[in-house]
Image (tube, rainbow, N blue to C red):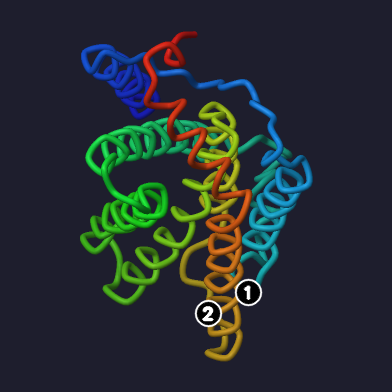
Amino acid sequence: MYANLGALAFLIAACYMTYCWDHRLNPNFKFKTSSNWSYLVLTVLIIFVIWDILWNICSGAMSRFTSQAFLQSSFRFAWKPFFDAISTGVSEETFRYLSIVTLLECLKETKHQVTFVVIISAMIFGAFHLLNVMDEPFIAAISQVIMAFVSGLVWAIIYLYTGKLWAMMIIHGIYDYFMFLQPIGISTSNSIFIIYCVIEVIIPILLTIWMLTGKRYKVLQANARRIMLRQNFSF
């Protein structure tokens, strides 16, 4: 519960910080359709999110007991992972928003501004998970850093394409909820683990490259400009 209060306090602090920067944090940009906008692209992003969540639930031996953990004993809902997921979803997506806004401002004179913002914000998100080294084996922590970086690429893309910060908090919360339900220390073969990592890394990177090209990139650029305009920072 304290973690949830901390996440809420962080969100309020972010609102105040952006206000001091002469902006308003808007968690719900309306879709601004244009010749570059595509609902097909939005559908692809939604399908990826669903696939990513289901893949992490079902892949390999790591999720063999997820269904039991989900219901727990006597069909009781798993409240602790639920509240933990809320706090991480809110706090980490707020952190991502602040990183993106800061980078957009710092790189506003850069030719490939949005591309650099996506990559650097993902690097920051991945580096943040280095803190797990204190609680987990080094290799496991480094793997989490890599996975966080790759996830950060796509989640930054999705936010910039949709402008829906609230949706990113929900997606992140659902993702973490099922991750928190997975038991720790379940072994699996090296071949299965390698396949899991390759798929989990390659598909998001290919999606990121695709989104950073053509009309899709122009939408990201347009939304980046909207984010940095004061009049678009109102609820």
How far apart are the alpha carbons under marks 2 and 1? 7 Å
- Residue at label 1? 61
**Residue drawn 23% across the image and 55% down it:** 131
**Residue drawn 40% across the image and 60% down it:** 149
- Residue at label 2? 187
Left of 7 or right of it: where is 221?
right
Q: Is residue 181 above or below residue 136?
A: above
Q: Secondary structure at mark 2?
A: loop
**Residue type, mark 1 in image:** Ala
Q: Secondary structure at mark 1?
A: helix
**Residue drawn 40% across the image and 18% down it:** 25
Could you tell me residue 82's position as x and y percent?
55, 35
Mark 2 touches mark 1? (CB < 8 Å): yes
Name the quadrant containing residue 56. Answer: bottom right
Could you tell me residue 79's position as x and y percent?
56, 33
Q: Is residue 95 above or below residue 21?
A: below
Label 1 crowding class (10 Å Cα cut-off): few <14, some 14-19, many 20+? some
- Relative depth, front residue between 64 and 53: 53
Could you tell me residue 141's position as x and y percent?
32, 67
